Amino acid sequence: MFTLLIGLLAIGYVVYKLTEDTPKQDPWANKTNTTYRLEPKIEPIRRPQPPRSDNVPIPCTAEKKLSITRNKVDTFSNKVEHKRSEYLTSKNERNFYIALREALPDDYMIHCQTSLMALIQPVEWKNNSRTWAKRMDFVVTDSTTKVICVIELDDRSHQRADRKKRDQYVNEALDGHHKLIRFKASWTYDSENIYQKLKNEIDCPHPRFVSRG
């Protein structure tokens, strides 16, 4: 057994010596003459920026922002579109107005489409909406705008149930406050007939026109 161990040690020593005497190969020996090329780095092209000044306006930017802002306002706006009225009165009411003007003295004034709220006000505020929403066809005043009478021109629409209810409210509201005179709508109007009715109702002074006898 001892002899076998000595033999193994001897073989190991011989192998070690043979390995130590064998020259080791340099891994860089074949790479000494190799040439390496570095790829050029590509830089992004940047355009030169002009020097910024507070006195030089930036083109287009402000206008675009203003346009965008306006569009946003229009998009979210609650604006209600309206249409224009050329006259305060209808064609029939204008014909009556001309005749009424001739039936009144020069210092009397005629106001069209006057709010009932401008003539009277409810004692209790809860009834305001029922009054301010109604308009009188004509209001006659003196030169100081003191109310002389209120005139309503009743056409066929006043025969409807809703208009009768509205007229009843107006009659009761003005009662004891302002004189209300109603005329029936017609195709034509006579100034003298209008004057005679006004004279009977409010003792209207003689108008500027010459009475036809």
Image (cartoon, helix red, strand yellow):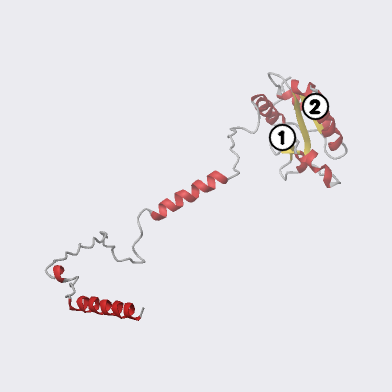
Residue 202 shows up from this direction = no
Residue 172 rendering spot, x and y as whole percentages: 87, 34
Q: Residues within 10 Å of mark 1 (few under 14, many from 20)?
A: some
Q: Which residue bears the numbered disc 1?
A: 105
Numbered disc 1: secondary structure: loop
Taking 156 as reference, is 80 above or below it? below
* Labels 2 and 1 touching (C-beta < 8 A): no
Q: Please state which of the two labelled residues, at mark 2 or mark 1, is closer to the viewer.
A: 2
Residue at 71% from the left image edge and 34% from the top image edge:
105
Question: Residue 32 sits in which quadrant?
Answer: bottom left
- Quarter containing the N terminus: bottom left
Q: Residues within 10 Å of mark 2 (few under 14, many from 20)?
A: few
Quarter of the picture holding the C terminus: top right
Gap in angstroms between the C-alphas marked 2 and 1? 36 Å
Label placed on residue 162: 2
Of residues 109 and 71, the one nearer the viewer is 71
Amino acid carrying label 1: it is Pro
Q: Position of residue 15 (x, y in %)?
A: 24, 75
- The amino acid at mark 2 is Asp
Q: Nearer the viewer, residue 150 or 132?
A: 132
Single out the residue that lies furthest toward the left. Answer: 33
At 49% from the left edge and 51% from the top edge, which residue is drawn?
69
The quarter holding residue 131 reads top right
- The picture places residue 140, in percent across and down from the top left corner, at 74, 36
- Tag 2, which secondary structure? helix
Rendered image quadrant of residue 128: top right
Q: Observer-nearest residue: 133 or 202? A: 133
In the displayed structure image, the side of residue 58 where residue 117 appears, left or right: right
N-terminal of the pair, mark 2 or mark 1, is 1
